[in-house]
Amino acid sequence: MIKLKTLMQLKGKHCYWCGVETVLPYDPNKLKQNSPTREHLIPKSEGGTDHIDNLTIACYTCNTNRRSMSEEEFRNSEFLQHRLGYLYNRGEVQRTKRQLKRARRRERRFWDKIYAEAYREDNARSIAKVTGQAIEEIMLNWTTHA
Ligand SMILES: [Zn+2]
């Protein structure tokens, strides 16, 4: 697995979710709220890999509160909304807005691809429920007809 420091060089030191500037802990056994962590965009429990494209930096607070939520679920979660409000009031969000925007743009292409795949799979699952066909068979038909 990629080193945390290397990942920070690639993805920046701001939390992917809340934009807070993460600070490496002096003592790795004493993780603080804004300590950087490796975040799996697609959670490992949902089949996400350790590939660099699936990894980004999240603060310890966001990482632990997200658990296995999807990106969309977590963005809409009460927790993140509250956290963003809290950071905004402290003036920390404005400071990092530009970096955050840049990071989002960088990740957008990746996510577009993932969502397109998930959408296809969702559709196939719905069709499979009605027709009794295998999902793989339905998706294979789409590929050959495309
Ligand atoms: Zn965060």
Image (cartoon, rainbow, N blue to C red):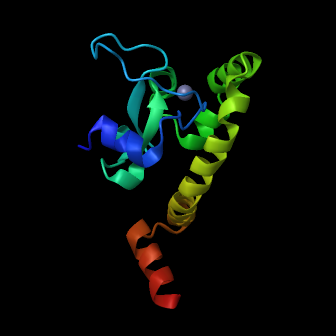
Answer with the quarter of the image where residue 8 lies.
top left
Q: Is residue 94 above or below residue 104?
A: above
Q: Is residue 79 above or below residue 130?
A: above
Label count reads 0
**Relative horizontal placement of residue 110, taking residue 101 as reference (left or right):** left
Q: Position of residue 21 (x, y in %)?
A: 54, 28
Q: Is residue 38 above or below residue 89?
A: below
Q: Position of residue 31 (x, y in %)?
A: 37, 14
Q: Write down which quadrant ligand 1 falls in.
A: top right
Q: Position of residue 97 (x, y in %)?
A: 69, 38
Q: Position of residue 73 (x, y in %)?
A: 60, 37
Name the residue at 45% across, 28% down: 67
Name the residue at 42% across, 27% down: 36
| Viewer can see residue 8 | yes
Name the residue at 59% across, 33% down: 74
Name the residue at 54% across, 38% down: 16
| Viewer can see residue 43 | no
Q: Residue farthest to the bottom?
A: 145
Front position in the image: 90 or 60: 90
**Relative horizontal placement of residue 139, taking residue 82 as reference (left or right):** left
- Looking at the rendered image, the quarter that the N terminus falls into is top left
Front position in the image: 64 or 127: 64
Q: Residue farthest to the top?
A: 30
